[in-house]
Amino acid sequence: MDRFRNYDIAFVGLKAGKHDFNYEINQEFFDLFETEQEFFNPEISVNVLLDKHTTFLEFIFKVSGTVQLICDISNDEFSENIENDLKVLVKFGEEYDDSNEDVITINRKDSDFNIANLIYETVVLSIPMKKVAPSVKDNDEYQNLLDKYSPKIIEEEDEQVDPRWAALKKLKDNN
């Protein structure tokens, strides 16, 4: 955990109230995680607002910046703007528990909280699932191919309705 020390927030010495922390994230940060990424050359600003209460901590993460992606269709590199927010409550208990994505429990004896994983998750979740370069989005030829080979949703008008649901379907059709 020593390599993540720069992302520890020592909350014990802070007064109750709001406190701002800012980080500039680049590839060096993501290399700490030793995982394969779908992006490269990140230039990301992270603003962390800590609202310290007597019985819990409230963190609000605001991530914005750019990453380089590879287009799923043309294999071209392109720059993508990303932006994401995350709100996490940290409460005190007997042992660490992050099974709930919105509430993390830390040991009440802890004096600091490491936010590196939360920053990482916030950035990764802001990357689009479908990576399409602007040159592809604006190209009619690619759009025609996408339309041609994208799965079509076919609605069946004359499908048989289970008699138990017929009354509900009738209500739906009348509205």
Image (cartoon, rainbow, N blue to C red):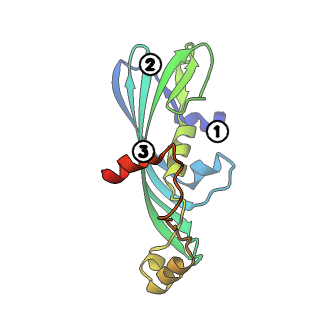
Amino acid on which disc 3 is placed: Ala
Q: Nearer the viewer, mark 2 or mark 3?
A: 3
Residue furthest bottom in the image: 141
Asked if the residue under mark 1 is in contact with the one under mark 2, i.e. CB atoms within 8 Å, the reply is no
Label 3: few (<14), some or many (≥20) within 10 Å? few
Q: Determine the residue positioned at 53% across, 23% down.
A: 112
Amino acid on which disc 1 is placed: Arg
**Mark sitting earlier along the chain (2/1):** 1
In the foreground, 49 or 99: 99
In the foreground, 99 or 116: 99
Label 2: few (<14), some or many (≥20) within 10 Å? some
Q: Determine the residue positioned at 46% across, 17% down.
A: 12
In the foreground, 167 or 100: 167
SS of the residue under disc 2: strand
Q: Nearer the viewer, mark 2 or mark 1?
A: 2
Residue furthest front in the image: 163
Q: Is residue 152 visible?
A: yes
**Mark sitting earlier along the chain (3/1):** 1
Q: Which residue is identified by label 2?
A: 56
Spatial CA distance of label 2 from label 3 is 50 Å
SS of the residue under disc 1: helix
Spatial CA distance of label 3 from label 1 is 63 Å
Looking at the image, residue 21 lies above or below residue 161: above
**Mark sitting earlier along the chain (2/3):** 2
Q: Position of residue 125 (x, y in %)?
A: 52, 49
Looking at the image, residue 133 lies above or below residue 87: below
Q: Is residue 63 visible?
A: no
Q: Which residue is identified by label 3?
A: 167
Q: Which residue is identified by label 1?
A: 3
Amino acid on which disc 2 is placed: Phe
Q: Determine the residue positioned at 44% across, 83% down.
A: 139
